[in-house]
Amino acid sequence: MDARARLLPKPAIEPIWIKFKHEGAGMRILIVEDEPTLGKQLKSTLEHNGYAVDLATDGEEGHFLGSTESYDAVILDLGLPEVDGLTVLDRWRKEGKVTPVLVLTARDSWSDKVAGLDAGADDYLAKPFQTQELIARLRALIRRASGNASSELIAGDVRLDTRSGRVTLAGEPVKMTAQEYKLLSYLIHHKGKVVSRTELIEHIYDQDFDRDSNTIEVFVTRIRKKLGQEVITTIRGLGYSLEEPAA
Ligand code: CA
């Protein structure tokens, strides 16, 4: 290398993004669908996009799961055995459940759509639908429920783009593993609220995860190393918070 070349600035290195399923990272979805093929297909597609997914195949099981477990959104078919979808939705709303619900209606059933929206559905999609549309609507639903109008979520100097899965600190890209991203994503979607460890585990992992492990703390420590100690506040005995809640 000659002397002049040595003085030239180093070429900018393109950051290498770890490929992972960022779309639904940290989000837990309930599907209530009785058509076996469609139900399994939806579950695997959403899981492939990073969501943790539970599948119920009748209205009774669906209602039970939706009442007792905590989900970021529900995909609810209307024509269901045991208890129909509209009744399930109506029960959840009467119980005070505010989880966003996307209703699946029969094609062109205008009355289904109206009835669904009247019963408290947040959005609907007519069958048959494109999976990409379902995922886009789901993403928008979850974002709206957390009060965010844009796909980019901001907390101080930290920005997280839910579409590309990129995280930046003061404009500089930060590499994160899938688990770190999921945890950060959940906290940033619930900015200003205290999130318990149990809630994090429930939303980040599916039912098979070992819930007694201390991994959440390990991830929090790693995120703090990357984004700064102050980014996540530990609320003693309660959990974690991104930004101290207003006193
Ligand atoms: Ca059905």
Image (cartoon, rainbow, N blue to C red):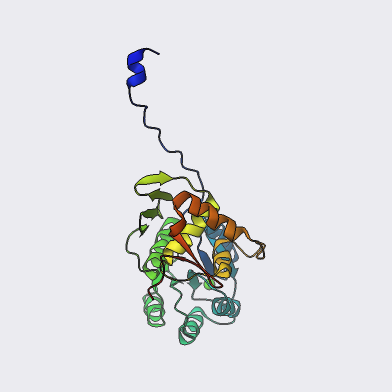
Answer whether residue 128 is visible to the viewer in this image: no
**Picture quarter containing residue 190?**
bottom left
Give the residue at the far top of this rendering. Answer: 2
Q: Nearer the viewer, residue 151 or 88?
A: 151
Q: Nearer the viewer, residue 184 or 4?
A: 4
**Picture quarter containing residue 146?**
bottom left
- Give residue 161's position: percent from left, percent from top: 39, 53
Q: Residue at x 59, y 56 (%)?
A: 218
- Give residue 224's position: percent from left, percent from top: 49, 54
- Give residue 200's position: percent from left, percent from top: 54, 65
Number of dots carrying numbers: 0
Judge whether 205 appears above or below 79 on screen. above
Q: Residue at x 35, y 49 (%)?
A: 170
- Give residue 65's position: percent from left, percent from top: 58, 76
Q: Nearer the viewer, residue 135 or 27?
A: 27
Answer whether residue 202 is visible to the viewer in this image: yes
Q: Quadrant of the C terminus?
A: bottom left
Judge whether 122 appears above or below 53 on screen. below
**Picture quarter containing residue 216?**
bottom right
Q: Quadrant of the N terminus?
A: top left
